[in-house]
Amino acid sequence: MAARRNIGIPLLLLAALGVTYLWVSAQDLDSMEARVLNASFIRDATVSHLLLTAVAAALVVVIAIPLGVLLTRPFARLLTPVVMGVANVGQAAPALGVMVLLSILFGIGTKIAIVTLVFSAALPVLRNTIVGIQQVDPALLEAGRGMGMSRGQILRRLELPLAVPIVMAGLRTTIVICVGIATVATFINAGGLGDIIVAGIKLQRTPILVTGGVLTAVIALGLDWLAGLAEKYVRPHGI
């Protein structure tokens, strides 16, 4: 059953792309639609969207996981409410508003878009890292100490491996958030599939709007599916 589900999701996504392509191809596109719905424009927008998502997700991993580990240490636990509060504000604040404010202060472009994505999408990984480490059975940690493990060895060999499933669940959420928020990067000239969606809205052309929306949804669901596969491979054996 699981194998069928793993195969079914990409097949469904490919079918959605195929149906959209056939539907758009059957339309009598005018000159404005043809300028947007060409292979070069769509490819560039898709690649730009994937790059924004990949860079932001990678930065979230680099920042949020070590920070989450730090906040589980006894000497830093008093900082947890403050850091989590900031992370909650990042996810709760409207991404477009944050992006506009940052662009006013520092200018427009890809860097501002990535900063906004990281700020808005860091919470799931940060929170799940903390929860994943805290849920490790204290008896296992005590057994590790009894075997002579240092604090660093307990973290590397017990706490982090056992926290992997929960951390990966947070990363999957972060990736989907990044894909969604990256669509508004078009407003600060950072590219992405938002270029297609906004063009469809401005020109009031349904084929353009549908194409941008379907591509965004397919990327979000496809990356979530890939992250689910990765979760199975990095999950420690026996969990």
Image: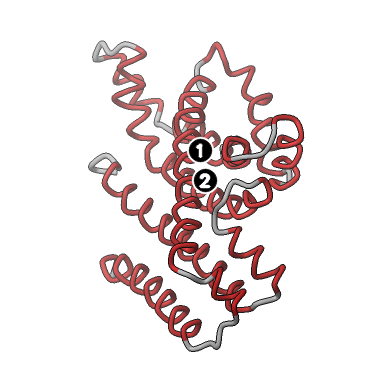
Q: How many marks?
A: 2
Tell which of 10 and 159 is nearer to you.
10
Q: Are marks 1 and 2 in contact (CB under 8 Å)?
A: yes
The C terminus lies in quadrant = top left
Residue visible at 49% across and 50% down? 48
Residue indicated by mark 1? 125
Of mark 1 and mark 2, the one earlier in the sequence is 1
Under mark 1, the amino acid is: Val
**Above or below: residue 116 compared with residue 37:** above
Please provide percent x and percent y for residue 229: 31, 53
Residue visible at 46% across and 49% down? 172
Under mark 2, the amino acid is: Thr
Relative to residue 167, is residue 102 drawn left or right?
right
Residue visible at 60% across and 82% down? 30
Cα distance, mark 1 to mark 2?
Answer: 7 Å
Please provide percent x and percent y for residue 88: 67, 37
Q: Secondary structure at mark 2?
A: helix
The N terminus lies in quadrant = bottom left
Q: For label 1, count other residues whose C-alpha is less than 10 Å away and answer few (under 14), some (14-19) or many (20+).
A: many
Of badges 1 and 2, the one in the foreground is 2
Relative to residue 61, is residue 95 drawn left or right?
right
Please provide percent x and percent y for residue 206: 63, 78
Relative to residue 30, is residue 95 drawn left or right?
right
Among the 4 quarters of the image, the one containing residue 91: top right
Please provide percent x and percent y for residue 18: 40, 78
**Above or below: residue 8 compared with residue 225:** below
Tell which of 187 and 123 is nearer to you.
187
Tell which of 132 and 182 is nearer to you.
182
Q: For label 2, count other residues whose C-alpha is less than 10 Å away and answer few (under 14), some (14-19) or many (20+).
A: many
Residue visible at 30% across and 21% down? 143
Residue indicated by mark 2? 174
